[in-house]
Amino acid sequence: MKKSILLLLFSGFSFFYLHSQITINSDDIIAVDFVANQTTDTLPDPSILEGGVGQTTWDFTALKDELAAQFVFFEPESTPYAASFPSSNLALEIEPELFAYMIQDDEKIEVIGIEGFQDFAGFALTGKLTVTPGQSLIRFPATFGDQYQEVVVQQGQVPGSDVGFPTIDSVRLTSTVTRIVEIDAYGIMETPVGSYNTIRSTETETTEAVVENLNNGQWVPFFDLSPDTLINYNWWTIEDGLAFPVVQLEFDPANGTREVVWLQELISSVKDFEIHANLYPNPASDYLQIDFIELMDGSIELYNLNGTLAQQLKINRQHNHKIDVSSLQPGVFILLLRDDSNKAIGAKKVEIF
């Protein structure tokens, strides 16, 4: 299935709410250093439908856990392509070796570019995609009844030899995306892991794309791609001043297929980890030492920034633990602490050099 930028980005988290309208502002979204465990249902049950408008409820408890993934949100300067997007203040690795760069301010969060290993006109290679002007993920304040329209241009360029045309200097893909966005429904969303009070954003995207080649210093149309329309439904929630999408449903009108990305767990690196343990040295090269204030039962997990589990250690009624990190590749990791019921109780960013 075709993927929109919006379906690739973001996750949410699970709490119970009263059935009422909510409003999301920029201050409610704190993404940096969050670890989002989500999964994709590629062939959702027929009961998984977007539903009507206005006040309503959604029973998505039939969603399946098919393609698990873990996203980590972090500062752009810690990523390999930050220099390409100097105005970005928010980034995440949406797929292994593929990074999205965003701008968050008081009015909106918008995607301004994607760089790394990705699909370019059917070829898998490393390249950069710019988005002009930025494509909105959400505009503030976001509440029931809001609507807007925007036109953005997504453009990427690679050497012709990279896509099978050695006699062509460069090949450029330009996609013009017309987006109609409306927050048209609100109410309780039920998923396999909890209940959420949500607002739903319905986003219709029509894309027209052209591939060009550079010939004698001029860009010449190579071929056009057929216009394509996708409808994305995004359910947003908020709790304790923190807001993210809970469920993202992509509908392709051309073939009637649906795909759903939904949240299983959100973990924040600011969940008072230091109250329960001291962690040192950080940065570290040989080992990390954790001293718990109380006896600890559970586990310690280390993830790299593309969500891969690098180490997992069991803790059995211990006051401290030493983690050997000498075999890890240098870089930034998320250390996640779980109790004996496997509940995440804290996380912290660590650097290995």
Image (spheres, helix red, strand yellow):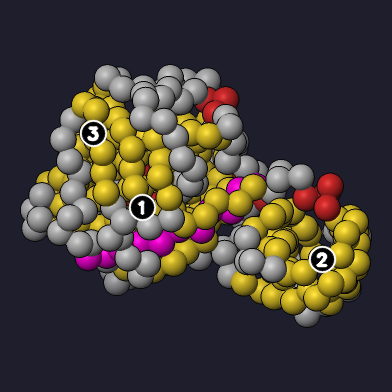
Of the numbered discs 1 and 3, the one sitting upstream in the chain is 3
Q: Amino acid at mark 2?
A: Met
Secondary structure of the residue carrying numbered label 1: strand
Instruction: Indicate whether 243 appears above or below 33.
Output: above
- Report the front residue among 183 and 170: 183
Instruction: Indicate yes or no whether the magenta region holds residue 40.
Output: yes
> Which residue corresponds to mark 2?
296
Image location of residue 211, percent across then percent down: 22, 52
User: Mark 1, residues whose alpha carbon is within 10 Å: few (<14), some, or many (≥20)?
Assistant: many
The residue sitting at 58% across, 41% down in the picture is 31
- Report the front residue among 236 and 151: 236
Q: Main secondary structure of the magenta part?
A: strand
User: Mark 2, residues whose alpha carbon is within 10 Å: few (<14), some, or many (≥20)?
Assistant: many
> Which residue corresponds to mark 1?
191
Residue 310, can we see it? Answer: yes
In the image, the segment drawn in magenta is 33-43
The residue sitting at 57% across, 29% down in the picture is 241
In contact (CB < 8 Å): disc 1 and disc 2: no
- Report the front residue among 208 and 295: 295
Image location of residue 311, percent across then percent down: 70, 75
> Looking at the rendered structure, which numbered label has been put on residue 56?
3
- Report the front residue among 139 and 313: 313
Image location of residue 129, percent across then percent down: 40, 48
Quadrant of the snapshot with the C terminus: bottom right
Secondary structure of the residue carrying numbered label 3: strand
User: CA separation, marks 1 and 3?
Assistant: 15 Å
Residue 137, can we see it? Answer: no
The residue sitting at 49% across, 23% down in the picture is 25
Image location of residue 130, percent across then percent down: 41, 43
